């Protein structure tokens, strides 16, 4: 047979020669990659690390990329959260060595600033000042030293979850509901002077502290590669509503600064009124048939998750005679708002036109009801100028919201009431969406001279809301610029600095203030506000069937600033999903093609203790998840060693107009901060088949039931996705795959001597499906295990396949979790080729291949 590059031959006929035993889910076998293992073996990737980290000088930026004096730096990293940042000394030594063996060369120190011991770095409050806990600081110092000794660079996060207390001089914040505390602290940081002073004091105390084991201050340590000032901290993008919801005296401080900004801009109330003229148009008819929701659904649709039913009850008394109401009877509370929605679809909305949404609402008990006018998918669900959370109670409340549409979405817009997250029944009546309305300018009694101009809300004139956004933009930019200056000039930070992630800052702020850009992306993040109580779900579907703009990792690529380094500092496919084996190969592939500077998986571990576990932890833990760990190790070469070459051509968007995510396999995509218009190639549409120009990468979802990704680089090859019953030829590597649970698996083969596979003398083959704990309590839809996560050791399913390799293979060995040989696999040698079968009978996820 002709050996062609990147060819998939599909169908049962291609598998006639494949005779392997297939084990189903009930016949899984245990497989553990011990968290204290650093023994030399074929699975040891620590040789990729230059030791210690920083041996080649500080990380710097050259030609828009991270470098050291030793050359280009690509980081294949992990996150640690909360108490996991403070292991005991003996644990730290083992953990650092093990992480290096996995191929890790970067660690993001995350969520260490939010709590007191054992989950954070804080100690007592003395005279209004919170001190660092000496024991926690010592544990972190030692851990950082061990990580750096093993060639693992450090990414320090400065503000993630810190929340000031009344003891530190911040009254009233202890009354903020727990679920809002973190966001409240983040918001205050941008404008509250005392909060900013508190933050600077922490930065000075923390970054100028001398690590006794490194004998260096953090600002002087070349093993620290980069600094993130903030994490997932939106201010101007969140809009003035966030500030308006703050408790006093913080709302008042924001309002004071807002009035000062207005006075500087407009000088007098007369000048302000001239700029903020009322905008009104006569109310017209409904823009579409609304139906009589109090009597029947009609054009409305009630979308519910089958596990969380809700039903309408019609013909109930409304707010006034002649107006009937519908009751939305919530039969079972859902974990997320989107699981129960009442939708009126297919509405025509024109950008720039004025509309008024009005309705009556009440509830059996106080609760919130979210409503928006928004896109109706399938790729875009964003609101188009109107979104509001209404507080409903036992009395009828009329809601009238005028807005100007921000997009033209012909017949693809909806009114959407999100009802999930509460089991309190909701009543609606008189829902209308009309052309016209009135947007309010400056209300009577509010003047610049009195300094009492309110924070603009939903029905304020567009000019007022635009001014509020501009004020918040300038405030945000000023804070970030000052923090970068403070860290560089006052504290002496020498490494690249960024603020928050690209999706959290207003366009242009990162480009104007920071050294590099960073973002976060997850495939099917767990939904549910009470995850700790077991009330959550995940999508649990394969990413491979949705290329283009629907894939968060391709979309993430488009947010990169092309003139500076780029990292993805959080990414994962949540446990206990069945498709988690994809996360390492898909990120290695994209990061290599796009020539990113770092990928940090979220997270290795979140809490102190349980380091050497044999079971899968909560949603994001890699530790104890053998399938993710095996793929992480096998894919290190693909990205770090540069096995897959970066794309040569570029598709550049602008600050306001990012390129299409569907281009990310054929062009280096991102934003040119200086461009005024996107280049023509940046406007390409999505497709179900994406391919790199040289054919080295193919993402084929033309048939979503067989969607998969193939990578064909000289020293590494891979295929993953819904690959059951298919045969693939990737240069001199051929694989015929047998039956698989849910048709899914990932297979990666990499040369350990950096030679092409056809000439390599030693290779690592990893083949994995999914992993789960013993006794996991899956629901019927296989979207949640609640709090029934089960026990160890983790159980995996082997991948049955027949491998043909153009190489003089002498032996193939099945390996245990440490990479030690378990036993030999039969090899059939031919003229210049070798053929062997892998599968669950070998009770392993990886194999060593030895050739002449």
Image: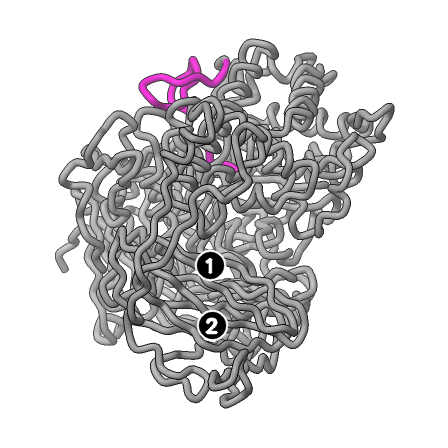
On screen, residue 351 above or below 343: above
Which of the pair 332/286 is nearer the observer? 286
Q: Look at mark 1 in the image and give the residue it sits on.
A: 524
Q: Look at mark 2 in the image and give the residue it sits on.
A: 341
Q: Is residue 530 left or right of residue 316?
A: right
The quadrant in which residue 380 appears is bottom left
Circle 1 sits in a helix, a strand or a loop, which is it? loop
At a point 50% along the width and 90% down the height, the residue shown is 315
At a point 28% along the width and 41% down the height, the residue shown is 658
The segment highlighted magenta reads: 58-77
On screen, residue 683 above or below 548: above
Circle 2 sits in a helix, a strand or a loop, which is it? strand
Are there few (<14), some (14-19), or many (20+) residues within 10 Å of tag 1?
Answer: some
Which of the pair 283/435 is nearer the observer? 283
Of pointers 2 and 1, the one earlier in the residue sequence: 2
- Whole-angstrom CA distance, mark 2 to mark 1, is 19 Å
């Amino acid at each position: 047979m002709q050996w062609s590059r990147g060819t998939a031959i599909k169908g049962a006929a291609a598998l006639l020669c494949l005779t392997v035993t297939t084990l189903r889910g009930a016949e899984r076998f245990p497989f553990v990659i011990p968290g204290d293992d650093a023994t030399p073996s074929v699975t040891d990737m620590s040789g990729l690390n230059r030791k210690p980290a920083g041996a080649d000088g500080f990380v710097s930026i050259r030609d828009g990329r991270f470098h050291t004096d030793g050359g280009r730096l690509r980081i294949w990293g992990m996150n640690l959260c909360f108490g996991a940042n403070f292991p005991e000394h003996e644990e730290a030594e083992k953990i650092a060595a093990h992480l290096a063996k996995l191929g890790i060369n970067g660690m993001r120190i995350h969520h260490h600033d939010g709590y007191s011991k054992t989950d954070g770095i804080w100690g007592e409050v003395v005279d209004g000042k919170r001190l660092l806990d000496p024991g926690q600081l010592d544990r972190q110092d030692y851990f950082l030293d061990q990580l750096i000794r093993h060639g693992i660079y450090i990414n320090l996060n400065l503000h993630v979850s810190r929340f000031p207390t009344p003891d530190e001089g911040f009254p009233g914040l202890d009354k903020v509901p727990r679920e809002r505390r973190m966001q409240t602290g983040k918001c205050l940081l941008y404008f509250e002077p005392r909060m900013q002073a508190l933050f600077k004091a922490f930065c000075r105390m923390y970054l100028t502290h001398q690590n006794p084991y490194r004998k260096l201050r953090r600002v002087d340590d070349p093993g620290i590669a980069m600094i993130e000032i903030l994490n997932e901290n939106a201010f101007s993008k969140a809009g003035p509503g966030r500030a308006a919801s703050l408790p006093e005296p913080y709302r008042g401080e924001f309002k004071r600064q807002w009035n000062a900004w207005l006075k500087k801009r407009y000088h007098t109330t007369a000048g302000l009124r001239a700029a903020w003229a009322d905008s009104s148009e006569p109310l017209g008819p409904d823009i579409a048939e609304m139906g009589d929701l109090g009597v029947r659904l009609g054009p409305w649709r009630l979308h519910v998750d089958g596990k969380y039913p809700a039903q309408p009850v019609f013909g109930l008394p409304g707010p006034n005679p002649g107006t009937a109401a519908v009751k939305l009877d919530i039969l079972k509370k859902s974990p997320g708002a989107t699981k129960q929605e009442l939708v009126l679809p297919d509405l025509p909305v024109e950008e720039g036109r004025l509309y008024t949404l009005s309705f009556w609402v009440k509830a059996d008990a106080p609760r919130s009801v979210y409503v928006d006018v928004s896109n109706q998918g399938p790729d875009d669900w964003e609101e188009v100028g109107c979104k509001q959370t209404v507080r409903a109670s036992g009395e009828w409340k009329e809601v009238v919201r005028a807005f100007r549409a921000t997009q033209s979405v012909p017949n693809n817009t909806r009114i959407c009431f999100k009802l999930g997250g509460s089991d309190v029944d909701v009543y609606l009546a008189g829902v209308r969406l009309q052309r016209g309305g009135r947007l309010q300018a400056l209300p009577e009694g509010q003047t610049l001279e009195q300094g009492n101009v309110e924070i603009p809300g939903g029905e304020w004139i567009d000019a007022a809301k635009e001014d509020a956004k501009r004020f918040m933009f300038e405030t945000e930019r000023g804070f970030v610029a000052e923090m970068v200056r403070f860290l560089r000039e006052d504290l002496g930070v020498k490494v690249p600095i960024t603020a928050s992630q690209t999706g959290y800052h207003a366009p242009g702020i990162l480009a104007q203030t920071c050294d590099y850009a960073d973002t976060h992306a997850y495939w099917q993040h767990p939904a549910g506000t009470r995850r700790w109580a077991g009330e959550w779900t995940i999508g649990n579907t394969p990413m491979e069937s949705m290329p283009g703009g629907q894939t968060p990792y391709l979309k993430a690529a488009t947010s990169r600033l092309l003139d500076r380094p780029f990292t993805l500092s959080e990414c994962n496919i949540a446990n206990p999903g069945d498709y988690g084996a994809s996360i390492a190969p898909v990120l290695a592939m994209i990061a290599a093609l796009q020539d990113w500077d770092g990928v940090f998986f979220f997270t290795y571990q979140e809490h102190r203790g349980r380091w050497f576990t044999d079971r899968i932890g909560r949603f994001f833990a890699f530790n104890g998840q053998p399938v993710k760990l095996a793929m992480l190790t096998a894919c290190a070469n693909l990205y770090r060693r540069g096995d897959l070459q970066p794309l040569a051509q570029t598709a550049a968007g602008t600050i306001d107009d990012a390129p299409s995510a569907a281009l990310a396999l054929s062009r280096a995509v991102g934003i040119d901060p200086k461009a005024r218009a996107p280049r023509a190639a940046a406007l390409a549409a999505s497709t179900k088949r994406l391919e790199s120009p040289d054919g080295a990468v193919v993402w084929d979802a033309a048939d979503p039931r067989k969607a998969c990704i193939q990578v064909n680089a000289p020293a590494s090859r891979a295929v993953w996705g819904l690959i059951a019953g298919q045969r693939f030829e990737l240069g001199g590597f051929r694989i015929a795959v047998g039956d698989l649970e849910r048709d899914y698996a990932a297979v990666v083969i990499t040369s350990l001597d950096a030679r092409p596979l056809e000439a390599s003398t030693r290779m690592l083959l990893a083949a994995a499906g999914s992993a789960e704990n013993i006794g996991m309590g899956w629901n019927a839809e296989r979207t949640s295990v609640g709090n029934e996560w089960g026990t160890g050791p983790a159980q995996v399913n082997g991948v049955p396949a027949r491998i043909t390799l153009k190489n003089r293979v002498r032996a193939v060995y099945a390996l245990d979790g440490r990479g030690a040989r378990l036993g030999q696999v039969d090899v059939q040698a031919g003229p210049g080729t070798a053929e062997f079968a892998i599968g669950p009978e070998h009770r392993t996820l990886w194999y060593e291949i030895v050739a002449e």
